[in-house]
Image (cartoon, coloured by chain):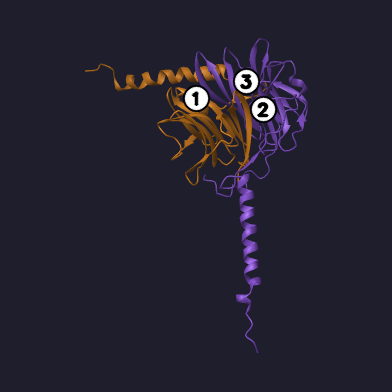
Chain colours: A orange, B purple
Amino acid sequence: MSSASPRGRGLLPAAPGIGLALCLLLGGCLDNGARPLMGLNLQLAHTAVNRDPALSSDWLALIGGREGREQVRLVRLSQGAPVPLPGLNRPDARPVSVAVDQWGERLALIRELEGRSELVLYRRSLQSLQLIPIEPAGVPHRLALSADGRVLAVEVGRGGLSQVDLLELP
Amino acid sequence: MPNSPGPFHSGRFWLGPTLLGASVLGLLLLVQACSLPWGLRRQPSPRTGLGLGAESRQDPALSGDGRLLASLVLRSGRSTVLLQDRRSGQTMPLPLLRGQQPHSSPSLSWNGRYLALLVWRGGRRQVVINDRATNRLLPLPLRGDREAQRLSLAPDGRHLAVELVEGGQTRVEVFGLGEWLEPDPVPGSLLQGPSSGARP
């Protein structure tokens, strides 16, 4: 039988959170008037790994999760909360690079699936996922999507060189 | 009166639709040659203008309106950011960034006024924002032993997301720049959504 009181059990999980908050408060400020978004940063800090951020107006897309089980996440800054992305994340896929348009409607994603890298375009309102073939063949490494959602730039490895492919989306 | 063939039986009646069909088919083939079935169009990347031969380009970034392209090229063996008009290939000078290579993780605001990136300064990687309108380089030093890995600047210049490493852990933090930078205006961004319809 455990001797810890309910109150004690409640405090113990909170301790790392308090430490993180102090760390963010003391070390998070940039000079020159840049201010950390404390609430959002604290929420993000609870995830084991967060990487490859892509901002577009009120939206932050990033790759986060536990090592080996990472997913694409989309957070609305003004609400400080993630929104669901049904049909985008797969347990057998590893996201590599992500970008979002200014409406949080289109997400472009490079992911590794069954040993191959592929480029996909996700439309959130339709919950649809479209594969974009790389032509000529190559391995996509990193991407950028214009905030208006009309242009996609993809770094592609071909024959030992890195090139940038540009695609105009309808 | 001889029974002359009506227009329905004349060769001319069929000639029109046939020509029309052939034209449409030709047009479709032409369009398909440079686009995917659902209308995506590929555009050759503008040349770097840094010399002949194969050029390696990495880490692309686009302005919010898609007009400008920033990418990293190797110049004298060091990674250097190159800013170009996406269509014409015209290169924009970035004199304030000279001597601070290697550059990495470029990110552009809506009209390309602000270029945020990581530069090598004082023996470490640092966050800077190049304000091309005022020709200033604004450093954003991270306090402590935290090191920035990647950046993303919001199109209006109001927020900056930084991927950083501290104590071996990688995480993302977002900073508000509203008190520091003038906004780079985003035309009508809150008034209209994409054709497919944005979801709140």
Callouts 1 and 2 on one subunit: no
- Residue occupied by mark 2: B71
Amino acid tagged 1:
Asn
Q: In this view, does A126 lie to the left or right of B175?
A: left
Amino acid tagged 3:
Leu
Residue A30 shows which numbered tag?
A: 3
- Residue occupied by mark 1: A50
Give yes or no for contact between labels 3 and 2 (Cβ–Cβ under 8 Å). no
Separation (CA) of disc 1 from disc 2: 24 Å
Amino acid tagged 2:
Ser
User: Where residue A50 sits: x, y (%)?
Assistant: 50, 25
Q: Nearer the viewer, residue B93 or B79?
A: B79
Residue A33, located in which quarter of the rendered image? top right
Q: Which chain carries label 1?
A: A
Separation (CA) of disc 1 from disc 3: 20 Å
Q: Which of marks 1 and 3 is nearer the N terminus?
A: 3
User: Where residue B48 sits: x, y (%)?
Assistant: 72, 28
Q: Mark 3 lies on which chain?
A: A
Whether residue B198 is visible, yes or no, is yes
User: Where residue B139 sits: x, y (%)?
Assistant: 69, 19
- Seen at 68% across and 23% down, the residue is B73
- Seen at 59% across and 39% down, the residue is A102
